[in-house]
Image (tube, helix red, strand yellow):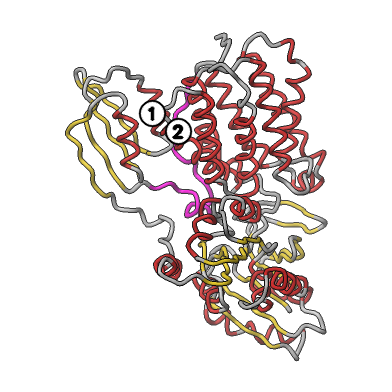
Amino acid sequence: MSVSSVDVELFKKMVINGAINLRNNREEVDQLNVFPVPDGDTGTNMSMTITSGVRELESCESSSIIDNAKVLSRGALMGARGNSGVILSQFFRGFFVGLKEIQHNFLNVEDLIACFESGRKIAYKAVTEPVEGTILTVIREAYEAVKDEAENFETVDELFDRYLRAASKALLNTPNLLPVLKEAKVVDSGGAGFVKIIEGMTLAVHGEILEAQEAKKVEKSKELKFKNLYAINLEFELKKPSYFDAKELKATLSLLCDSISLERKDKNVKVKVNSNRPGRVLEIVHKLGEFTNLEISNRKIQAQAPKEESSLVKEDKETMATAPKKHFALIAACFGEGIIQTFKDLGVDYVIEGGQTMNPSTEAFVEAIKKVNAENVIIIPNNGNVVMAAKQATGLVNGINVEVLIAKNIAQGYASLIGFNPDGSMEENLESMNAQIENVRSGEITYSIRDTEIKGVKIQSGDYMGISCGEILVSTKERTDALKELLSKIISKDAEVVTIFYGADVTLDEAALLEGICLEYNSNLDVEIVPGKQDIYSYIIAVE
């Protein structure tokens, strides 16, 4: 199939196909985590980012390809999660920027190469210190390959075939550019997610429309996190649709629904789907014709459904709207009911639930900034993979002084709160809070999901690992042994305070032993034990 240019209809099909291809393979991308910990979520973050863009794209009724690229960019920007998700949103923003000078309503080879170039430029600008061997490298080298061979491409399909080959080659080379990937024997997860999107787009150019597949089986520990559950059942008949392609409609609906059934009934089509956005589903099908015999019902959510939003977080949302305008407010991304309560007790005004296993979106931070109703706002991300989305949000609000504190884990964010003065200036608070971060040593205990060796530490699947400041220091079969060895490495003689948040999997009997274990390494410590109730991480430790 030879394609000379991309019109609006094909553009939409390409983006949707890219999103579906990533969604179908997101768990494969998730498992490319450098650390063998059960919180790899790059594939999920990127999938949610592009899906947010696709939802806006589907709502766009304009016939202008520039307008469609604009709403895609905006949707991806607001839905961006995790560092790779933010970079992906900036690539699509760059793609849109590359269209601004185009006078015609289609994209030819020259136009697309200009968009790839603009996407590369803006993606790199989004990162303060770009690192090669990441998604950025894949985006750059794919562009450079088609730029160098631009005169050889007569059709769009030839261009995309070459762009995909170059991106795939760049991905395979990422371990040679980033030693940590080579040691972990994985390619870059963000780059892998990008390749899946481009692969899906390329398939669409060749006329192959994908359908969303059922989620693959994963480790039990991951099922809670990734299972997509749709609570509303819709059944209706689509009357004599003027245009109907079952495969295309399934592809479109698959990003909003599961259990999609389309059945011909004379000249009508009987539709059954499960979705969390019934209104949007009906908007899409209404464009094809009138629907009748509509039935909507709730489904029973399976036992493994993600937890409902914490009542503590709901309380924030309900009270902020009526609160008077404040001089200062703090926003934090937290997980675990006990950790959330601790941050609130220490002065955090608004908690976005998530961070370690479900990174909040840019839109979640924008919403939080608006709700706190303050002149000055400090965001505490508590996770290195949340920082970019938080920073992106600061540029989307007007009239509010917003800064992001570089707190890359719960321990750092917890320690920083001691340095906050609600009556101080932004500069004074950032200086004081950063000083507290520099004065804390962090530690976490979690378990391994695969065999590997990192910086001389041999790790087997199922081992308990002790991690400090982004480095695996300990790996043992027994959790208590891992905790003791980690504490021996991070508790110094001059340490004064140790705070341990223990997780949902830790018994009260185990928790009762924690203070005594800490005092073995420094008898002068003030030890605070907090039931954090967090998942995945048995212990989160702050040593000050």
Instruction: Determine the image quadrant of residue 293.
Output: top left
* Residue at numbered disc 2: 212
User: Can you give x and y, in whole percent of width and height, for residue 248 in the image?
Assistant: 40, 23
Between discs 1 and 2, the one toward the N terminus = 2
Look at label 1 and name its amino acid: Lys
* Residue positioned most to the front: 399
Vertically, is 117 above or below 473? above
Q: Which of 511 and 330 is in front in this view?
A: 330
Which structural element holds mark 1? helix
Q: Which residue is found at the position 57% from the left and 78% from the top? A: 346
> From which residue to which does the magenta span run?
208-229
Which structural element holds mark 2? loop
Look at label 2 and name its amino acid: Ala
* Residue at numbered disc 1: 250
Q: Is residue 40 among what the camera can see?
A: no
- Circle 1/circle 2 CB separation < 8 Å: yes
Q: Which of 301 and 424 is in front in this view?
A: 424
Q: In which quarter of the image is the N terminus?
A: top right
